[in-house]
Amino acid sequence: MRFLVGGPIGFLWDLGFYANCQKYWWKDILFLDNLYLNDPACVGQAWYLGTDTQLYLVAPLIILPLYFLKKFGKAWLFLLTAASAVIPAAIIYQYNLPPTSLTNPLVTSEMSNEYMQKIYCPSWTRASPWLVGVWLGYIIYRQGNTRYKMNALTVTVGWTLAAITGLLVVFGMYSYNRVVVPMPYEVMTQVVYGGGHRLAWGAVLVWVVFACHNGYGGLVNGFLSHPVWQPVSRLTYTTYLLALPLQSILHYNTSQGGAYYFTHLNTIISTVGAVVLTLPLSLLLSLLAESPVVGLERLLLRPNHSTPRPAPPSEEKAAPPPPINPAFRNGEMAEEGTSTTTTTATAGFSNPVFTVEKVAKGS
């Protein structure tokens, strides 16, 4: 990608992104991007891969108690879920940090960097949505093939609360996230929103999945499960990896000496350009890297249901056996030049002619 970068500030690519990848590539390989934030990162958005992987590695400490010790497991999961909201709230209060990442003149760059290091990236302060997802997975596992029955009032209240909560999480910081005349936030806003907004957002997503899974999704389920999303859903990971580098390329090639004139039209043009470039390149990267690895993984992890290979068909078909004469069914027929004696008759039938018979040579 470095060969695609030009423009007045194109040299910053070599000084920043390219040089960081040469020196700190090991952080991406070991999924430690979210723990060593003082060092520059190779792939800027890869910090979330580290957070997600670390939570995945500790999952057995939650799943095993749920499976073997149900009461203890649920109490343990409830304690962790509560702690995932209390810990970030306490850190925000202790260090006087903003409730979330804000573009606000009242929030200095030092405060923003400290928020990223202490709240935004560490796995123990980002675990709330993941833990709520564990609750949902446990509920769906327990219900098996059955479906929960909910009346119309419960469904209506559930969707209403989910919509209101989602809107509050997304737009709740609007007055505080303004460059011109921002509203100063209070301690209560810091603690409540900073500690609970990720937990609330996870609860909204849990309701959407739970309602759709049990047949109460309506138009939302029809939209989210439409087949048109299936091809795009297979490119989400590679799109995630390529999106930020491609946006950086567009920025380095279009910025004039670092200045960017912000308008809605310029933002639309840059966004559409990034999407149009990202999707086909993501498809190419998925076919070259992700799909082969997924195929090998399926071959290695699939259960061993080996069956004996059928024998190839014979070129010459065996001749059918000749018909048997009922008169000799319980006796023996002599070869040419010999004689034989039939001593028994067909079961349940006595024929005096064939009771004792000699067939002599030449007769």
Image: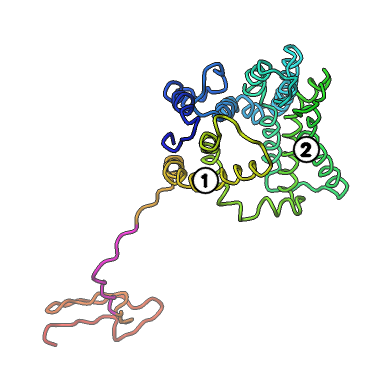
Q: Amino acid at mark 2?
A: Gly
Q: Amino acid at mark 1?
A: Leu
- In which quadrant will I find the N terminus? top left
- Rate crowding at label 2 as few (under 14), some (14 to 19) or many (20 or more) other CA atoms within 10 Å: some
Report the residue at 48% width, 45% height from top: 281
Report the residue at 78% width, 25% height from top: 193
In the drawing, what numbered circle is on residue 277? 1
* Occupied quadrant, residue 160: top right
Where is 7 relative to 324, above or below?
above
- In which quadrant will I find the C terminus? bottom left
Residue 335 is situated, as x and y percent measured from the top left of the image, at 16, 76
In whole angstroms, how far apart are the C-alphas of marks 2 and 1?
A: 31 Å
User: Seen in the image, is 68 located left or right of residue 331?
Assistant: right
Residue 62 is situated, as x and y percent measured from the top left of the image, at 64, 26
Residue 326 is situated, as x and y percent measured from the top left of the image, at 33, 81
Depth check, front residue: 188 or 255 = 255
Is residue 142 one of those drawn in magenta?
no
* Occupied quadrant, residue 113: top right
In the drawing, what numbered circle is on residue 221? none
In the drawing, what numbered circle is on residue 166? 2
Where is 245 relative to 151, above or below?
above
